[in-house]
Image: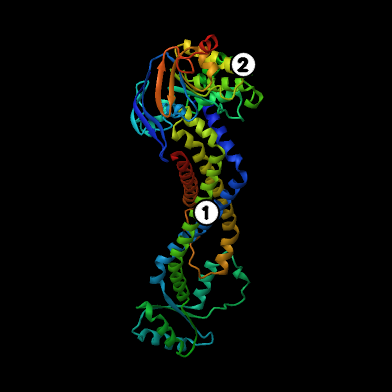
Amino acid sequence: MISIRGVSLVYPNGVRALDNVSLEIGKGEFIFLVGHSGTGKSSLLRLLYREMAPSIGHITVDGIRVDRLARGRIPALRRRLGVVFQDYKLLSDKTVWENVAFALQVTGAHTRDVRRQVPRALDLVGLAHKSRMYPNELSGGEQQRTAIARALVNNPKLLLCDEPSGNLDPANTTEIMELLRRINLKGTTVVVATHNQAVVDRMRRRVVRLDNGRVITDEERGYYFLGLGQDQILSG
Amino acid sequence: MDWGRIRFFLGEVQRNFTRNAGMQITAIGTVAVTIVMLGIFLYARSALIHAESGVFSQIEISVYADPAATAAQETVIRTALAQDPRILSVSFIPKREGLAQMRRLMKGQIDTSLLTENPLPDKFRIRVREAQEVPAVARSIARLPHVQNVEYGREVVQRLLQLAAVMRPVGIAVIVLFLLVAGIIISNTIRLTVFARRREISIMQLVGATNMYIRMPFICEGLLAGIAGTAIAVGALALARASLVPKIASALPWLPMNTVAVDLSTLVLELFAVGAAVGALASWIAVGRYLRT
């Protein structure tokens, strides 16, 4: 699904956000990107949805060479993946339904597709009954679920999440993670950048650890801290 | 047709348009002022251009005989004119014919039946070989006996046309300047809208809307401002034409205007095309700047 080879990203101000990163992510995987703030997790995600282009290196997402993608082709890439952020990025003057439908409408979808897809996405995130409410009438968890519905309404094969639980309390965080797990079970590849230790340790999925723009470890069924799960800390 | 899609699109345009109502009104007003000026310019040019072409071949001197002059005395004038080598042709218009001509010209405007006697003198119409010699010929004719008056009013016209030749580049410069100002104001208005909607735009980009799609509502917004401004301008121009043109024509009868020859529908179309183009172009530039960054 995703192939990253020898990627470095240097910002115009000289900061090296990513340093020779290589990573392969298979179809249907669930993967955490962990590390302190400013270690390059968000930068790596931005390269995947082509918010930025790498300074050097190859990136392929779902068969598309993202690192050398022409500007005019970016929309086609974005329609094949969904992105979720810490701050939800919802439009406050649109209802839940309209926010989700927006993603389809602005890509020129037919009304009948909008009418079919939006309820399906809202059902998936469990917000069908709140479709007429506005974002400021919802809890943080519900807003994030709306954002996830919007990311998924296109039926993408890849979901990128940048600190999806960053603004949420533990109960809502659990809810969102459970939703992401279910989405992953349906076959969508899910990449979650987070520094929420509890989330990572509970899910026991592949964990890629970044530090100073480098991949320092890559473990199947990993913990937030290197080789040292919470249970080990407690039992040890 | 997908009505839902059209309604969504129109909703976006309408939201843009109403968000900066104050700025929109400024933009529309500027377009209106610009288009009014352009309209006056094009109308005047169109009305004058038809008159101008004939002017040089039509320079002539009218010589009015003293009303008291006898037929013999008029023959003296005619002989003197015929002998002048600078004169190309002389035609004699007796006062009876002059009155008949006037009746035809003034038909419906002045009630000539009220005239109890013919107020017109006999007249000679003279064509001169060289246009530059007109003033000298006129002066020498004026010295002849029994000549009451010599006129060559076309000189005024000539001056006017010289003035027009100077005014044309100035007029074009002023209009270009105004179009530029209108464009900048529209562009700024659109940029405010773009700024107000930057969050929506970033989300549109995130979910894979094409730049073209993102641009369209803004282009339509600019187009609407341009068309609305032009509509106001055309309305104002139509009013002005109905009320002012006849007054100008009667106040300045020597002005060689041929208002019948002006193709009004083409003129209006031209104005709308300019208004719409300024609006669309300005917003294209405004959004383009934002999308590139």
Q: Are marks 1 and 2 in contact (CB under 8 Å)?
A: no
Q: Looking at the image, what colour scheme do you see?
A: rainbow
* Residue that sits furthest to the top in the current view: A235
Q: Position of residue B208 (x, y in %)?
A: 45, 28
**Residue at image location 54% in from the left, 13% down from the top:** A178
Q: Position of residue B284 (x, y in %)?
A: 46, 43
* Rendered image quadrant of residue B7: top right
User: Are discs 1 and 2 located on one and the same chain?
Assistant: no
Under mark 2, the amino acid is Ala
| Helix, strand or loop under label 2 | helix
Question: Does residue B25 appear left or right of residue B171 in this picture?
Answer: right
Observer able to see residue B108: no
Question: Does residue B278 appear left or right of residue A138 in this picture?
Answer: left
The residue pinned by badge 2 equals A171
* In the depicted structure, whether residue A205 falls above or below residue B4: above
* In the depicted structure, whether residue B289 falls above or below residue B146: above
Under mark 1, the amino acid is Ile
Q: Position of residue B34 (x, y in %)?
A: 53, 55
* In the depicted structure, whether residue B123 falls above or below residue B201: below
* Residue that sits furthest to the right in the current view: A137
Tell me the mark number nearer the camera, choosing from 1 and 2: 2
The residue pinned by badge 1 equals B35
Q: Chain of mark 1?
A: B
Observer able to see residue B63: yes
Question: Does residue A65 appear left or right of residue A212 in this picture?
Answer: left
